[in-house]
Amino acid sequence: MWWIWMACGAPETSNNTEPVKAAGDVAKVAAAQPQVDVKCDVELHPFTQVDVYEKPVKGATVVGQYPEGTLLRVEGIKGPWAAVTPTDPSGALPSGWMGIQLLTTNLRTTDDYPKRSEFRGSPTATERKPMPEVASLTVEACQGEFLRVSWEKEGGGNGEGWLSPTDHCPLSNTTCP
């Protein structure tokens, strides 16, 4: 009889300590966690105002918008979608999903930085090559702290490679420190 009483929604505790979650609550919490294909740990910003979605599927519910330049922590990717959380501690903006190609970063190219940004063939590659002068940069993917980017070179041509955390910075509308 006691098990039926628990399933009907009576207050749930265990030895008067922490509340025990009902099975439905556990499922809701699990569903709210991003299920990503690749885990990431990078900060980026959208290059334009973007919608943020509840799920990484076409036609999902829009749960909010991020203004251009909003600093976001990318937790992972699932196909063309990025699981993002705003770094703003106020909690005014929701976490959710957005297209990864709407995110960008800045290359370290300031005079006080000892060298131009460099790229690699993969996150684990040791060989590094200097970044060319680029006209545009697109984030394609992430893996851990590394970003896979593609670019159009000034004067024509394009390329792609991986940037380490020291070769880019997420700050928008400013130079990298």
Image (cartoon, helix red, strand yellow):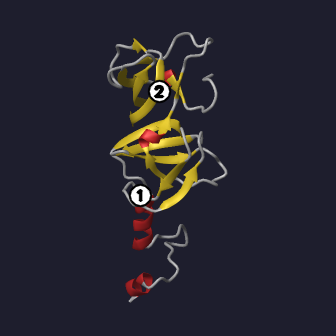
Q: Residues within 10 Å of mark 1 (few under 14, many from 20)?
A: many
Please report the residue visible at 62 percent of the width from the left and 23 percent of the height from the top.
Answer: 175
Q: Residue at coordinates 58% horizontally, 13% vertically from top-left?
A: 113
Identify which amino acid the numbered label 2 is placed on. Ser
Rendered view: 157 above or below 61:
above
Q: Quadrant of the C terminus?
A: top right
User: Would you name the residue on which mark 1 appears?
Assistant: 55
Which residue has dot 2 on it?
136
Q: Which of the 4 quarters of the picture holds residue 55?
A: bottom left
Quarter of the image containing the N terminus?
bottom left
User: Taking 32 as reference, is 24 above or below it?
Assistant: below
First reached walking from the N terminus: tag 2 or tag 1: 1
Location of residue 80 (image quadrant): top left
The percent position of residue 66, horizontal first and vertical second, equals: 57, 49
- Residue type at mark 1: give it: Lys
Residue depicted at 53% across the width and 67% down the height: 18
Q: Residue at x 63, y 46 (%)?
A: 88
Question: Given contact means CB atoms under 8 Å apart, are the residues at marks 2 and 1 in contact?
Answer: no
Q: Secondary structure at mark 2?
A: strand
Residue that protrudes farthest toward the bottom in the picture: 1
Disc nearest the viewer among 2 and 1: 2
Residue 5: horizontal and vertical position, in percent? 43, 86
Tell me where residue 83 appears, x and y as whole percent.
44, 48
Between 174 and 40, the residue placed more toward the observer is 174
The Cα–Cα distance between marks 2 and 1, rounded to whole angstroms, is 28 Å
Task: Judge whether residue 143 can be spotted in this image.
Answer: no
Q: On the image, which quarter does residue 172 sit in?
A: top right
Say few, some or many: other residues with alpha carbon within 10 Å of mark 2 (under 14 / 14 to 19 / 20 or more): few
